[in-house]
Image: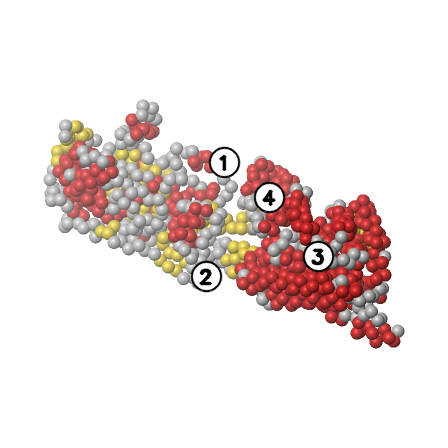
Amino acid sequence: MPASAREDRRPVLSRLDVVARGTWILIGVLAGVYWVHQVLRGEEYERQAENNRLRRVPVTAPRGFILDRNGIVLAENEPSFTLLLYRRETKDLDASLRFVAELFNRPFEDLKRRVERDRSYYDFVPVVLQENLTISEVGAVQARALEHPELVVQKTERRVYTQGTAAAHLLGHLGEATAEQVAARAKARPGDPNPPRPGEAIGQQGVEATYQDLLSGVSGSRTYVIDSFGREVGESGHESPLPGNTLRLTIDLGMQKIAEDYFADRVGSAVALDPKTGEILALLSAPAYDPNLFTRRVSRSEWEDIIENADRPLNNRVLQNVYSPGSAWKPFVAYAILTHGIDPKERVFCPGGLTFYGRHFRCHGRHGSVDLTTALQVSCDSYFYTMGKRLGIDNLAEAGNLFGFGRPTGIDLAHEKNGIVPSTEWSLAVRKHPWYLGETISAAIGQGPVLVTALQMARGMSGIANADGALPTPHLFHIGENVRTGERFVYRPESKESIPYPPGAHETIVEGLWRVVNMPGGTAYASRVPGLDLCGKTGSVQVVGQKEAKKGHLLPKELRDHGWFASFAPRDDPKVVVVVFVEHGEHGASVAAPLAARLAEYWIAKSRGGTPELLAEVAGRPLGRAPARAN
Amino acid sequence: MSRLAEVLPRRLDLRILFLALALTAIGIGMVVSTTAGTPRADLAGKQIFFAVLGLIAAGVLLAIDYRILLQYSPGLYGLTLLVLLWLPMFGTRIAGAKSWVKVSGGFQLQPSEFARISIALLLAWILENDDRALLRSRTIWALAAAIGVPVILVMLQPDLGVALTYLPFLLTALFFGGLPGRWWAILIVSGTLAVGGSWFLLKDYQKDRIRTFLDPNLAARGAGYQVRQARIAIGSGGILGKGWKQGTQSRLGFLPVRHTDFIFAALAEEWGFVGVAVFLALYGSLIARSLALARDARDRGGSILVILLVLNIAVQALVNVAMNVGVMPTTGITLPFVSYGGSSLIATWCMVGLMLSVAYRRYVNV
């Protein structure tokens, strides 16, 4: 080759230098990019890689059982089967869904919608197609497992309420945690180690809700290594769940059942508690619902039965419904009388009604000349009209407030109503107009604006039953037990309130209430039980004057009065307070008192060490209406 | 013969040979790592077989004087065009592209990979015959046509990734041939227009690739998935990596096409930044050493041939490395020496053989 061949390559050589340097610069830049991702941001990517690789599946802890005070199971768990669809394994979605639709007799579109709803998730997350499969349904799915590998039956646990409707309102039920509930809890408790997950079953009402944390235990987890198809390749670790604590309630199932039987065809509520400790022995609201409906499949008609029932079975009438106390209010007015310098021996003449402020107020009888004790015994309105007028509304309100009315009792159940203890101040603040003096006359016999719950009535009655005036805090929690360690913990809310009785005042009121049941002429004399020393006060609430009454189209039953009976037994050293309220039951004496007497009799027999046979005899004796007597 | 034995080690460029062997060995190691324990575990053995074939092919090309090949390059090129013309009509369709010719034993050849060799030879021959400081227009058109025709034929298969690997030839040829300034202007303007215009010709999945390149978080499971997962693989490798066959992104299948297009991400995951740096240093050394060989070549044709070959490999490698980390769109360009693929590996080794042949004959007095 000639030398000139080398000469004409000079431009090529200089360009080679440019390219060589350029290559090293590009390699340097690329190395820099890798440096940024691998060294500077390495940890962040490592976390993402771990998230890719590991799938943490929460394992729900077995929920604690709920027992009655004697150890009888009220709520437990049983195995349940859930049908899952793995979309990743699904070859023909429509064919899979048609198979499921046919098997469970469900509309194909429903299933389709359910799958569509979860579209946005990764398709290795299974879709829940059907809950609570029966054993035969599980079998039917398993039999076609080869054809439908995408359908998987998962074993879970389901809550079972062994007593059906018997303790529905106090137990409550479980329901899926809503996004709002999860958010609200996260806000209330930042850093909670065991937060509920959306969709997880948590207590929604009753003690299931109040003691959610105690019952739920701590969920564990399993961590799986998965590949990009979501297939489990291995398990990288697991954390066992800590089972929930057993919760023993203060409820006595025997008493609860007596009340339930009595209310089978009635509407109303009953509550029995120990006046010293506040332990609730029975708490019943009728009509009830079966809490198992919420954990099983609820059919549309069952659900409509509950929701559209005019008697609103979901309401816990013991603490969520407020009523006029009627004559059951009189013991508390009696307290106002005794603490404001009025001689209980002072007599008022009852001619069957009296006129105040130009209006005639009727009494249900002509009681003649009555003192306080007699007025309680025969429930003389004229006496209480007269004394109420003399005391004025604010003195009556003071007594009502002292006995715990107008505010929550502090029971360990949510959504408790306050009720109303009217006063001049209340009238101005709430109704925006001054108190009318004529209203005092009605308020003195528990009519007018006075509104109370049955639970408030039971707590107030405890303040009368207890000679020291102690006002207990009603509660359902008895004993919690850690199922692993056997450690027991008792919670007994202390009573911080008590009623101050001037000398003789307590005895006077109790004497009046004893005579109601145990002396001829007493309004609940028909419900006396020998040896029980039941004391109580009947009450009837006129439905006339309520909204329905003003309408023209009144149904006969709706016209009838509500009946109260608030009681305790025995007279000395009371063991039990019982309040019974029957809607449209006409008279407290005829419909409420018999059940109250029976519940008290049962509990006294039990606390005196009564044999099971005796208790069964008490519980099983027929219980009917007592002869009606006005009150 | 005794003279050859004496001269061979002195003339054979052992550095290129060892660097290429090292990269090939790393590639085999990564193919093992990305396929072991999967139904594709047989690929590692195949890759070794291809490497051996590649070495033999390189030896054959080393034995032939490249000047003879340059002389015959128009004929070789014409033959190549015939094969590329035949493919879209009668080729074996794999993964949607008729890019393959069936060979016995269940193997397929991808002629478009080998076409790069005859294209490089033809370009070097053209440039050898126009050795002015600046290229004549006629030569420029000849170069453009020599690349344009096979690009169009390969895009008909359609295989955009391989077609794109032909384009560096044009730029290299023009740059080293000496393109007048006004031609650069025309090239830049028409290139911009072509890129802009081609947006309307691109298939939806190709558009998606570009969109997701611009924003990898666009769709977690959609088109951006590959880019995102590759980046997680690379980033999670950290400084020292997770160790050979320990890459979770790669082994658990989160990394897409991990034994071919994204094999470098697998390497980055398992060997960390240290591995990346070592690998890039090896590759850089190979390129630098090849460019030095071009400088020492005996004649313009040999020099241009080496430049065309090494820059073709270099552009593919850099684009692939950039694509793995998401700084360039996913184009289907593989990593020479490393990515699994028989045709690519053998063709790359043929190119090494040609470069060694030029280097071997760098002294006029042999």
Nearer to us: label 2 or label 1: 1
Q: Position of residue A273 (x, y in %)?
A: 31, 48
Q: Residues within 10 Å of mark 3 (few under 14, many from 20)?
A: some
Q: Residue at x 29, y 46 (%)?
A: A408
Pointer 3 residue? B175
Q: Position of residue B196 (x, y in %)?
A: 64, 45
Q: Quadrant of residue A337?
A: top left
- The amino acid at mark 1 is Arg
Find out whether the residues at labels 2 and 4 contact each other: C-beta distance under 8 Å. no
Pointer 4 residue? A137
Pointer 2 residue? A484
- The disc numbered 3 marks a residue on which chain? B
Q: Earlier in the sequence, mark 2 or mark 4?
A: 4
> Would residue A419 be seen by someone viewing this image from the given angle?
yes
Q: In the image, which disc is placed on residue A300?
A: 1
Q: Nearer the viewer, residue B237 or A118?
A: B237
Q: Residues within 10 Å of mark 2 (few under 14, many from 20)?
A: few
Q: CA distance from mark 3 to mark 2?
A: 81 Å
Q: CA distance from mark 1 to mark 3?
A: 79 Å
Farthest residue, direction top:
A552
